[in-house]
Image: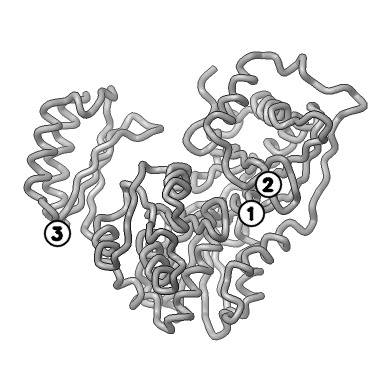
Amino acid sequence: MGKLFGTDGIRGVANQYPITPDMVMQIGQATAYILKKRGHRSRIVIGKDTRLSGYMIESTLVSGICSMGADVILVGPVPTPGIAFLTTNLNADAGIVISASHNPYQDNGIKIFSKNGYKLTDEEELKIEELILSKKLPSLLTSAENLGRAFREEDASGRYVVFLKYSFPRNLNLEGMKIVLDCANGATYKVAPTLFKEMRAEIITLNVSPDGQNINLDCGSLYPGNLAKKVAETKADIGLAFDGDGDRLIAIDEKSNIVNGDKIIAICAKKMKEEGMLKNNTVVTTIMSNLGLSVAFKKMGIKNVTTKVGDRYVLEEMIKHDSVIGGEDSGHIIFKEHHTTGDGILTALQLLSVIKKENKPLSELSMIMKTFPQVLINVKVKRKAPLEEIPELKSIISEVEKELADKGRVLVRYSGTQSICRVMLEGPTKSDAEKLASKIAKVVEDKLN
């Protein structure tokens, strides 16, 4: 039996290990048992996105949790950040999200939030994993009279909508704005249209008819092309694209240009600094953010801390540096004064509040940073030898970095989930970047195959 938890919970193809009914039941049992406190009946919130396999996983988790004497609060399809909020709002001991985020519908996963709305620590995940692997769960089941119950919370989405509204300035609303929403046939398909209507925006919706198999299918934050066309066609002020579980946002400006996470972070951080809200004058981003973002921060006099890829690492650094904003170019952005995790709808509201306050279109605000041309080459490899131990690779990277000087950067790293080495290069022009990235990729191919 392999390791269960990856960098973002447990994930895999539905009905294949580890997302099989027997394993899911054990995950439910172990989570309930680890969280059980003496003299206290535990409650666990369960929410999901719109995948077909969500029904199977939800009912199996319920069985596992109830068999340990804990109760379940079912909230149905709600964005991942909504579950983080509801866990604290409903005074639960944990929250579980059934989702594989931006992956295709065949995949599914389980993310667990602690009672304070933060994702479980590595240590807590390890305890759950160890209990499952110990094979002791059957001996720990509760008695017949102490079995748990499952309840449905009918007003979960309403509670979450109210929470989101409170993140928006009280003296502003969205009246007069035409907004196109792409809900990726995912967890935001009800919540987002409801919220933006209530805030007086004129809305046009795309991909709000989930059928269990169309989540993220050529839509949402990974595929914003159709949203860009709709913004042009309807002469909208902005387009907002969420991913399947609603923790990411990619925006489209009124000229149909894509505005990614880096630009959204820059726009919001600048406004926060002006308003004296940028705590410790620090923003946390990952190594995948474009060089243009750090150049923009230098001009703004903002300190930029970088970390490895993954929202949990962003949050760790934010807590360490007491920073209130951090995120990834993918559009997963954390506003720590408002929430414990990345939230696509909340991010959209922060961006819209800047547009309203500045009274400028998004295309103008986006000029805050110049994006360096970026090339990413994925090289299939047979082995994953430590990169720093390959002299020829060290030599070519050093040579390329010398040539780029301060006009670009190189990042070579292995994929965490596939047999791939990623060669990412930013340079002054697209052709320069392509030429130099290919040089490095050739060495990777030669030495790791």
Q: What x and y, as percent, mark residue 37?
A: 76, 31
Label 3 and label 2: CA atoms lie apart by 45 Å
Can you say which quadrant of the picture contains the C terminus? top left
Badge 2 marks a residue whose secondary structure is strand
Q: What x and y, as percent, mark residue 424?
A: 24, 45
- Say whether residue 341 is visible: yes
Badge 1 marks a residue whose secondary structure is helix
- Say whether residue 219 is visible: no
Image point (37%, 72%), residue name: 256
N-terminal of the pair, mark 1 or mark 3, is: 1
Q: Is residue 129 left or right of residue 378?
A: right
Picture quadrant of residue 174: bottom right
Which circle marks residue 47 in the picture? Answer: 2
Disc 3 target residue? 429
Label 1 and label 2: CA atoms lie apart by 9 Å
* Nearer the observer, 77 or 38: 38
Q: What type is the residue that disc 2 sits on?
A: Gly
Where 280 sits versus 354, above or below?
above
Q: What x and y, as percent, mark residue 233?
A: 44, 78
Image point (82%, 35%), residue name: 41
Which circle marks residue 82 in the picture? Answer: 1
